[in-house]
Image (cartoon, rainbow, N blue to C red):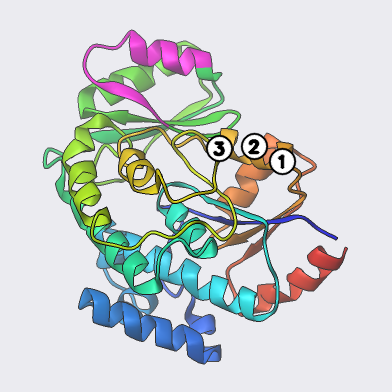
Amino acid sequence: MSKIAFIFPGQGSQYVGMGKDFYDSYEEVRDLFKLANEVTGLNLEEICFTENEKLNQTEYTQIAMLLTEMSILKVVRKLGVTAVMSAGLSLGEYGALAAADVLSDRDLLSLIRKRGIYMQNAYPTGGGMCAILGLDTELVEKACEETDGYVRIANYNCPGQLIITGEKVPVTNAANKCCELGAKKTVELNVSGPFHSSLLKDAADKLADELKKVSINNPRIPYVCNVDATAVTTNENIAGLLSDQVISPVKWEQSFKFMLDNGIDTFIEMGPGKTLSGFAKRIDRGAKVISIQTVEDLEKISEVCNG
């Protein structure tokens, strides 16, 4: 019997039309969209399914991504597939919360809509983020430490792929230092803020206030949080972890290894793209991962779970 974890991608893998076939095929997905529209006052069918500029703006991306992930989760659960653990990268941690039944659908959708707005507006001068490819973590940390101004690692994605974040000029300068130290490539990210840095403290504080207003349940299954890459099993510290997550590095590589070390042998990625599946192969070549982003992909589940 497979020991399954549900995993959920973060911002950046969104695309127009994501989740459309689930919406067309399943009434519970249409009901979820109806609830999301009611909670947010948005037309999420339009944002997710039609060509528009909003989908790549943080305040809309986050709600659209989570809605897609929750839609796929509902269908996978309907097929009788269960997990013993969940995790998600950045925004995807809210998909993991859904899988662990930590918050109601209404509260999840409301919180992620506000999180997106708070994060987009927290640092008006923009800041910057940059992917550093092919350089050891210690050398990326060294480049950040030796750069004047605020810059730090934002994401530990997988071996050879880190994201740095901070003030725009220091991020550029640190990326140049990384190249001097042997990085294969650096890629400036098209983002609206220096995410996962203390420059977003205002967003973290506002989210903390919102988290006080919702009912947080004990997780039905453990979920692995981004902040410290360990399993959360009670509701005691969840609000603090979620607000801290906005300003803390995302420890995805460490989270994935934690799941492997705790006996997870099958990972089901739910959401647009195959980002986490790609990271998984870089972390552990033997990791068994499938990506579910279309209804057709559901055919893979029986093969993986019974294989």
Counting residues from the start of the chain, the first of labels 2 and 3 encountered is: 3
Which residue is rendered at x = 28% and y = 67% of the image?
110
Q: Residue furthest right?
A: 307
Residue type at numbered disc 3: Thr
**Position above or below: 243 against 114:** above
Residue that label 3 marks: 230
Q: Residue furthest left?
A: 124
x, y percentage for residue 69? 49, 67
Residue that label 2 marks: 258
**Proximity of marks 2 and 3: CB atoms separated by less than 8 Å:** yes
Residue that label 1 marks: 262
Foreground residue among 231 and 60: 231
Q: CA distance from mark 1 to mark 2?
A: 6 Å
Residue type at numbered disc 2: Phe
Q: CA distance from mark 3 to mark 1?
A: 10 Å
Counting residues from the start of the chain, the first of labels 3 and 1 encountered is: 3
Quarter of the view holding residue 35: bottom left
Please provide the residue range marked out in magenta.
Answer: 138-154
**Proximity of marks 1 and 2: CB atoms separated by less than 8 Å:** yes
Q: CA distance from mark 2 to mark 3?
A: 7 Å
